[in-house]
């Protein structure tokens, strides 16, 4: 077990910078998820930690030692790949023990470790099968088993659930979390799926265009995003972004969304945003769950407005409503019994206590 | 109205299915017709060889139906199989083919692995170059090769010309490029993650090759082996040029040079020798056919 540190790590392919100076400290036992859209550099970062890609600049440290020029086999890491990468001609047991056999471990110990890992992953019955006789979920378990038996300092997961169907993905997600709770090995996990990131991680690293946008616990990222990218990336359906500006009306600060709609800000928010220049182009960030149906007993800071719905999506436990505010598409989440209908007018309530205000040009959350 | 429409739709759909299967039946008939045609075309010479090999010289030269054996005899087989000369050709051919296969595999497997996986400067050009060398016909190469060997022989004093073992150096120029090319295709079809997993598991490049790549690409390896064996076994031009003494000859050259004396063609023995010579590749094909076909198709779709 060990901590992992990245110091100003850069990866260049010819003239293109895939990773542009990343600083990251991963504590011992921690489960870190790198998340971001395709091409954001998350897989490249993982592969540099693994030693499968050379780094162009900076330092990578595992357990305090700089490993920039250490080959993968000497970094004491284990990796689980998206397509499992099981050796097709070997049985499950042989797949899992390959690394140990190469290192000439005693046979008894190999057997003990394989048996233990198989028990942990519930694949004891499959131990003599070949990979082609296994289902996708079973293969992924074997791939994890191969990582576990090595008892490495760090686990690296490269989108391990992307090849599985939706139901199995949820199951395996829980499996991975359970395994981490048992073995407590430092883990770096790459995914493009923000739900996986939120559910698995101790801390999530959101990456975009080769840079880290924000590092934080899932809750921090959700409730206190640092940038528009993070705010929009985390959460499903995504946060609404509505152009707006600040106004002073009768000594009170209010936010104007359209000619028709303007809300007075709750005192805490007003204090926070009071210093901002009034003419800046701003964007209101509001999550769909903070746009609900209006009802009789609204708390402080919750403002209502009338709109005409374009489309509704009944999801069962909630209904998503879509409408436009001066051309900006907006999504809200209402109670399925609130009577939302396609094309019908509806009174909605916006919870301004949970609003975010962003600078339109820089994308920074203010 | 709607019921009528449904009734109409029923039979018209059936006709469609019927025409589908009729198309298929005709396709099958044509396939069989051409397959039988090709089978006759390609099997006639071996059958004729077999018939002739079972005849005595007298019967061959007699004006009887050449497609029938009236007095079958194994004398041709007995004579050849008890002739030290023929056994010598057979031995030379076997040793040359086997050693060439070994040399070819020892060179082309690591070469293909390096070209397919270790991306180094110029590896792509080199891979194409390897294939291009295969395209140069041996009829262009044998004179310069002969010159080269003569020079080496003069310089070193080691006798190379008119020795069967010279073929061990020459045949790989035919087999290595093609086998390397086949193996590059195979190795390239193995997912990159597999060698990365092996690398992380602690395997060296050599261990990755021997413990992962060779077992996984075994069908391709067998295809390449069969190719190398067939080429070395059947090669005619090079042994004809480079070996002349009777005890240095390989089978294809041995049969034609020793069994044709002047203008006397010993047809019975020529045919018997050719049949016996065709046996080893045939046996190898028969045993490895499944692998060979799996190998060829896998290479075709993935490589």
Image (cartoon, helix red, strand yellow):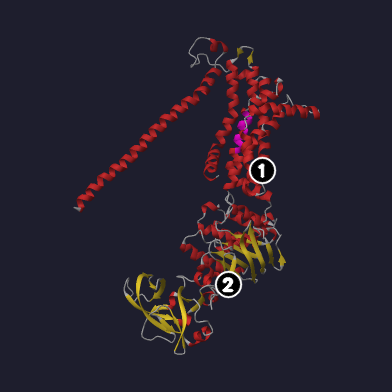
Q: Secondary structure at mark 2?
A: strand
The extreme bottom residue here reads A251
Q: Which residues are magenta?
A: B224-233
Q: Secondary structure at mark 1?
A: helix
Question: Where is B248 relative to B171, above or below?
Answer: above
Count residues near mark 2 (Cα–Cα under 10 Å), then give few for <14, some for 14-19, many for 20+. Answer: some
Question: Where is B127 relative to A150, above or below?
Answer: above
Does residue A320 appear in this view? no
Query: Which numbered marker is on residue B111?
Result: 1
Q: Position of residue A82 (x, y in %)?
A: 55, 58
Mark 1 chain: B
Do pointers 2 and 1 mark residues of a single chain?
no
The residue that mark 2 highlights is A214
Q: Is residue A175 left or right of residue B91?
A: left
Count residues near mark 1 (Cα–Cα under 10 Å), then give few for <14, some for 14-19, many for 20+. Answer: many
Does residue B51 appear in this view? yes
Query: As rendered, which of A176 and A327 lies closer to the eye?
Result: A327
Query: As rendered, which of A112 and B46 lies closer to the eye?
Result: B46
Mark 2 chain: A
Q: CA distance from mark 2 to mark 1?
A: 46 Å
Image quadrant assignment for residue B251:
top right
Q: Position of residue A217 (x, y in %)?
A: 56, 74
The extreme front residue here reads A279
Question: Where is A154 relative to B241, above or below?
Answer: below
Q: Is residue A297 left or right of residue B243?
A: left
Image quadrant assignment for residue B166:
top right
Query: As rendered, which of A217 and B73 lies closer to the eye?
Result: A217
């Amino acid at each position: 077990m060990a901590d992992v540190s990245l110091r100003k790590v850069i990866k260049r392919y010819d003239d293109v910078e895939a990773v542009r100076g990343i600083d990251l400290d991963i504590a011992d036992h921690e489960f870190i998820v790198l998340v971001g859209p395709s091409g954001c550099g998350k897989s490249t970062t993982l592969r540099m930690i693994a030693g499968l890609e050379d780094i162009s600049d900076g330092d990578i440290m595992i357990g305090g030692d700089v490993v920039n020029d250490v080959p993968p086999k000497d970094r004491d890491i284990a990796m689980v790949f998206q397509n499992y990468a099981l050796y097709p001609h070997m049985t499950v047991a042989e797949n899992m023990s390959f690394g140990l056999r190469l290192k000439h471990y005693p046979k008894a110990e190999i057997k003990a470790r394989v048996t233990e890992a198989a028990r942990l992953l519930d694949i004891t019955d499959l131990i003599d099968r070949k990979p082609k006789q296994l289902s996708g979920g079973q293969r992924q378990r074997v791939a994890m088993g191969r990582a576990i038996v090595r008892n490495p300092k760090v686990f690296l997961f490269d989108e391990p659930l992307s090849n599985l169907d939706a139901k199995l993905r949820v199951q395996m997600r829980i499996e991975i979390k359970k395994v981490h709770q048992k073995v407590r090995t430092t883990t770096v996990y790459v995914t493009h799926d923000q739900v996986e990131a939120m559910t698995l991680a101790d801390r999530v690293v959101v990456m975009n265009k080769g840079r880290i946008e924000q590092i934080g616990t899932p809750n921090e990222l959700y409730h206190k995003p640092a940038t528009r990218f993070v705010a929009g990336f985390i959460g499903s359906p995504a946060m609404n972004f509505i152009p707006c500006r600040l106004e002073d009306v009768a000594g009170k600060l209010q936010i104007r969304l359209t000619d028709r709609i303007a809300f007075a800000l709750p005192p805490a928010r007003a204090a926070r945003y009071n210093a901002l220049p009034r003419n800046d182009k701003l964007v209101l960030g509001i999550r769909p769950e903070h746009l609900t149906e209006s009802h009789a007993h609204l708390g402080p800071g919750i403002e209502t407005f009338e709109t005409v719905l374009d489309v509704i999506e009944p999801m069962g436990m909630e209904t998503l409503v879509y409408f436009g505010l001066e051309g900006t598409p907006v999504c809200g989440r209402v109670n399925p019994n609130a009577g939302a209908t396609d094309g019908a007018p509806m009174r909605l309530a916006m919870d301004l206590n949970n609003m975010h205000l962003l600078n339109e040009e820089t994308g920074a959350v203010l | 109205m709607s019921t009528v429409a449904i009734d109409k739709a029923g039979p018209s759909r059936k006709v469609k299915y019927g025409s589908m299967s009729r198309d298929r039946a005709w396709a099958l008939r044509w396939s069989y017709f051409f397959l039988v045609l090709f089978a006759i075309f390609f099997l006639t010479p071996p059958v004729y060889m077999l018939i002739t090999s079972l005849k005595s010289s007298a019967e061959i030269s007699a004006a009887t139906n050449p497609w029938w054996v009236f007095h079958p005899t194994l004398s041709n087989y007995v004579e050849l199989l008890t002739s030290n000369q023929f056994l010598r050709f057979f031995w030379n051919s076997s040793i040359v083919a086997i050693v060439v296969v070994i040399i070819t595999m020892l060179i082309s497997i690591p070469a293909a692995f390096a070209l397919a996986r270790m991306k180094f400067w110029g590896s792509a050009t080199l891979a194409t170059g390897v294939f291009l060398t295969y395209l140069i016909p041996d009829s262009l190469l044998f004179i310069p090769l002969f010159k080269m060997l003569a020079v080496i022989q003069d310089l070193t004093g080691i006798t190379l010309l008119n020795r069967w073992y010279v073929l061990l150096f020459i045949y790989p120029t035919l087999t290595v490029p093609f086998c390397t090319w086949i193996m590059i295709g195979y190795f390239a079809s193995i997912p990159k993650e597999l060698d990365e997993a092996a690398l992380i598991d602690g395997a060296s490049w050599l261990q990755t090759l021997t413990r992962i790549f060779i077992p996984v690409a075994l069908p391709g390896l067998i295809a390449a082996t069969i190719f190398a064996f067939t080429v070395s076994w059947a090669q005619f031009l090079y042994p004809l040029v480079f070996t002349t003494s009777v005890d240095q000859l390989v089978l294809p050259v041995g049969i034609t040079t020793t069994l044709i004396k002047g203008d006397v063609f010993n047809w019975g023995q020529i045919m018997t020798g050719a049949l016996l010579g065709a046996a080893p590749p045939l046996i190898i094909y028969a045993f490895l056919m499944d692998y060979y076909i799996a190998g060829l198709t896998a290479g075709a779709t993935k490589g």
